[in-house]
Image: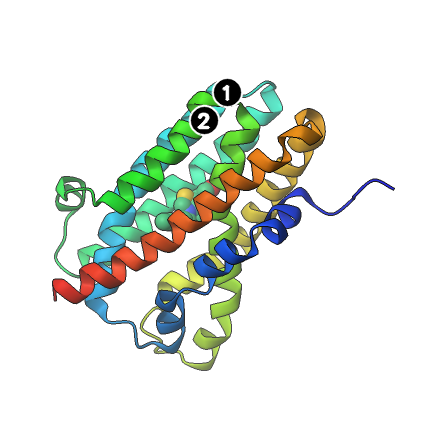
Amino acid sequence: MADTTPFFDRLKAAAQTEWQSYVDHDFIRQMEAGTLPQAVFRQYLEQDYLFLIQYARAYALAIYKSPQLSDMHTIQAGLNTILGEMHLHVRLCQRWGLSQADLEAAPEHSATIAYTRYVLDCGQRGDLLDLLIALSPCLMGYAEIGLRLAPAVAANPDHPYREWISEYASAGFQEAARHSALHLHQLAERVMAPARWADAVAIFAKASRLEADFWQMGLDLGQTRV
Ligand SMILES: Cc1ncc(C[n+]2csc(CCO)c2C)c(N)n1
């Protein structure tokens, strides 16, 4: 019988260790508890702004790699989500006196470079499926984290990370993640040969590990620059 498990769920199950190291990172646990130092969050957010600029390029590359017009439309919606997400960063950073120009002028950390350029490289050397697999931990992981942390915000209206958590727990964001998982599944059904499975898991596991490294970078930077 053919395996009808959604493609994303199969990837997640095949790379459980890397996935857990990402969605259950200490950064997330501290954020949920509200104990994450603000200096850590700020360092993370600054790097994340630079991350999103490169990520927008990866989505543009995905449009270029799209075999069908319908793929382009779906990816365009993802690009719009990224550009919207950047407003959240600018808004939060403005409260600490950081302007958009300050954000753009910040030096890129090696964890930011490693993750974004890895994803771009997957897209350049591979096809749309390779690129969407490399992109999937980002959207799907934040959706999972948003849902998991939402009760902490509901229990405490003064939660320090309320705005960030609410963005990723929101119905609109959750819907974007579902839509993107469905797109990935349908594309895999169209183009995925069984022989590609090991490569697909390797890409997914690596991108998940690079996400975990990104949280760790925030923790490390926040400790050194208070
Ligand atoms: C390191 C890092 N990983 C994932 C996201 C989440 N994210 C980035 S772009 C995007 C929209 C994709 O359609 C989402 C959800 C982030 N902000 N920073």
Q: Residue furthest right?
A: 1
Percent x, y of residue 132: 53, 34
Q: Quadrant of the C terminus?
A: bottom left
Which SS class for mark 1? loop
Of mark 2 and mark 1, the one earlier in the sequence is 1
Q: Is residue 170 in view?
A: no
Rate crowding at label 1 as few (under 14), some (14 to 19) or many (20 or more) other CA atoms within 10 Å. some
> Image height check: is 157 above or below 137?
below
Drawn side of residue 6 relative to residue 61, left or right: right
Would you name the residue on which mark 1 appears? 65
What type is the residue that disc 2 sits on?
A: Gly
Would you name the residue on which mark 2 appears? 123
> Cβ–Cβ below 8 Å for labels 2 and 1?
yes
Note whether ligand 1 is within 8 Å of mark 1.
no
Q: Residue at x 67, y 29 (%)?
A: 195
What type is the residue that disc 1 sits on?
A: Lys
Residue 123 lies in quadrant: top left
> Image height check: is 150 above or below 176?
below
Percent x, y of residue 56: 37, 34
Percent x, y of residue 47: 24, 48
